[in-house]
Image (cartoon, rainbow, N blue to C red):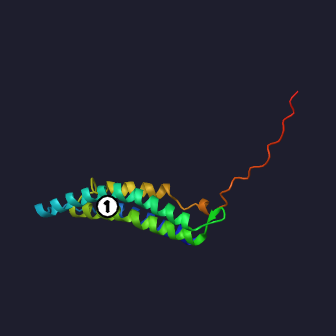
Amino acid sequence: MPPVKLIWLAVVSAQVFMLLFLGVSGQRFETEEPAQQLAGLLFMVGWVALVLVVPIAYFIRNQIYKAHWRQDAVSDEGYVQANLIFFALLELPAILGFVSAFIEGRLLPGALPMAVVLGLLLLNYPHGRPKLDASPRLGVPEKRNER
């Protein structure tokens, strides 16, 4: 298994583990008002981070692809580097959501940014297509026999 797929699997597994931990732990404890305010603040910061980080992560990944474009495909080094940075950037809103949910002592609403990040990670499975030859092989169209 290529290293980028192993890293993707580790990141997705970490997301699933964090969601399961929050769901199974069921910590329902009374927190003080400042802790509740901190949880609410982290929840909002998590959503703001999600809205800001996702487009930035795609932009940076594409810029790295562009910098490592060799002939008609992305080099292996550029592909791994771009996806590592992409996965790392997506972790920020997920971690903020995890901390918010943990402080609040319940799964929802704090884990919603984590669920969105998990969905994005699943949609961005490292299939390796950017490393494949991207140029279309357009030949001369064949003439049709018209009668």
**Would you name the residue on which mark 1 appears?**
24
| Residue reaching furthest to the left | 33
Expressed as whole percent of the image width and height from the top left, the position of residue 44 reads 25, 56
Expressed as whole percent of the image width and height from the top left, the position of residue 63 reads 50, 63
Q: Residue at x 61, y 59 (%)?
A: 129
Q: Residue at x 11, y 60 (%)?
A: 33
80, 43: nearer the viewer: 80
Expressed as whole percent of the image width and height from the top left, the position of residue 38 reads 18, 62
11, 23: nearer the viewer: 11
Quarter of the rendering occupied by the C terminus: top right
22, 139: nearer the viewer: 139
| Residue reaching furthest to the top | 147
Asked if one can make out residue 104 in the rendered structure from this viewpoint, the answer is: no
**Relative horizontal placement of residue 72, taking residue 111 as reference (left or right):** right
Q: Residue at x 86, y 30 (%)?
A: 146
Q: Disc count in the image?
A: 1
